[in-house]
Every structure is written in C-alpha cells, then in structure tokens.
Image (cartoon, rainbow, N blue to C red):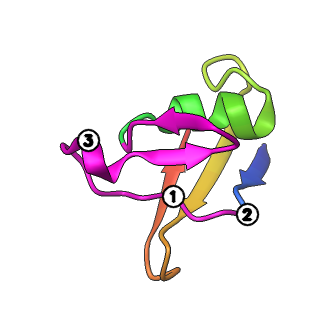
Amino acid sequence: MTVYVAMCPVDFRVGSERSQKTVRGTVFPTNGLALAVQEMFGLDPCLAGAVFAFRAKRAAHIKLLV
C-alpha cells in the first residue's frame, strides 16, 4: 500500500467558515480532506487505493484518509 504524507499542515477544526484552509489559492473546508488530496497530490482519493496522512499545525495530531 502506498502512503502519501502532506508536507503542509491542515486545520482540523470543524464547523466554522473561519477555519477553512487555503492551499495555492483554493479554499478547502476542514472536513474536506478528500478535496485536499485532489489538490495536493492530483489523485482521486476514492480510486487511489492509498493512505493519505495529514498533520495539524503543531504536529501533535495526525489524520489518515484511507
């Protein structure tokens, strides 16, 4: 299985518009890690058959999208 690791931190807070993440001019909702995969890696997370790892700003938390 392939594991992709996002190099830039992602905001994990959920539910408010001010907690959106901007990557290269594109705004992602914080619960939209699938959209972040499409932008950062250029892959469809549903078809990739891989694990995508994201870290919080302080690097104290990670989330995996399988």
The answer to whether the residue labelled 2 contacts the one labelled 1, judged by CB atoms less than 8 Å apart, is no
* Magenta span: chief secondary structure: loop
Amino acid on which the number 1 mark rests in the picture: Val
Which quarter of the image is occupied by the C terminus? top right
Marks 2 and 1, how far apart in space? 9 Å
**Horizontal and vertical percent position of residue 54:** 57, 58
Q: Are marks 3 and 2 in contact (CB under 8 Å)?
A: no
Q: Secondary structure at mark 2?
A: loop
Relative side of 36 to 60, left or right: right
Q: Is 2 left, or right, of 11 in this rendering? A: right
Q: How many marks?
A: 3
Could you classify mark 1 by the number of other residues whose Cα lies within 10 Å: few (under 14), some (14-19), or many (20 or more)?
A: many
- The 10 Å Cα crowd at callout 3, few under 14, some 14 to 19, many 20 or more, is few
Query: Magenta residues?
Result: 8-30
Give the image location of residue 15, x and y in percent: 18, 43
The residue to which callout 1 is attached is 10
